[in-house]
Image (cartoon, rainbow, N blue to C red):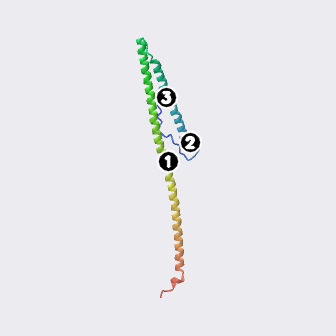
Amino acid sequence: MMMKNKAGGAGGGMSGSGEGAGPTAAAAAAALQKQKALLQRVETDITSVVDNFTQIVNVARVSDLPVKNSQEAYMMEMRASKMVQAADSILKLVSELKQTAIFSGFASLNDHVEQRIAEFDQEADKTNRLLARIGDDASASLKELEAHYYSSAQRLTPDV
């Protein structure tokens, strides 16, 4: 029995900001649902492999009747085919899990990069405000010094 589950998207790492609702909660619910589906697939496929192997062993008894031997051979071939299908499904599941781990790693990395960009943008804004305030203070101090210089007696007396 082969079940296909091709949910393309996020899963795996759930690195959020601790919010109870929104995209983080939806992603967590989707990841939990996907995990349950994957566990169900594993359970079904492994059960299929074990059951079919057991049936092959049971049918493998040698009988004297040629008709019965051909029926048993057909049953063994059919069970072996089902085992191969279940094993193939497990291999696809492993591949899907690897891809999910890789892509969720990229998603969390992208989230981290976006978070750091936002932090640096805030720092840049704070730095720009600080520089503007320092420039205003320097300008006010310069105007005050100019006013003091132009009104001083030192300026009015000629140098001899």
The alpha-carbon separation of the residues under discs 3 and 2 comes to 32 Å
Identify the residue shown where x is 46% and y is 38%: 98
The alpha-carbon separation of the residues under discs 3 and 1 comes to 36 Å
List the single residue furthest toward the right.
Answer: 20
Identify the residue shown where x is 50% and y is 52%: 116
Q: Residues within 10 Å of mark 3 (few under 14, many from 20)?
A: some
Of the numbered discs 1 and 2, the one sitting upstream in the chain is: 2
Q: Residues within 10 Å of mark 2 (few under 14, many from 20)?
A: some
Q: Position of residue 94 (x, y in %)?
A: 46, 35
Query: Which disc is residue 144 wearing?
Result: none
Of the numbered discs 3 and 1, the one sitting upstream in the chain is: 3
- Above or below residue 29? Residue 111 is below
Q: Which residue is mark 3?
A: 46
Q: Nearer the viewer, residue 137 or 45?
A: 45
- Where residue 33 sits, quadrant-wise, is top right
Identify the residue shown where x is 53% and y is 76%: 145
Q: Position of residue 96 (x, y in %)?
A: 46, 36
* Amino acid type indicated by mark 2: Ala
- Above or below residue 11? Residue 150 is below
Identify the residue shown where x is 53% and y is 34%: 36
Q: Are marks 3 and 1 in contact (CB under 8 Å)?
A: no
Q: Which residue is mark 2?
A: 25
Q: Residues within 10 Å of mark 1 (few under 14, many from 20)?
A: some
The alpha-carbon separation of the residues under discs 1 and 2 comes to 15 Å
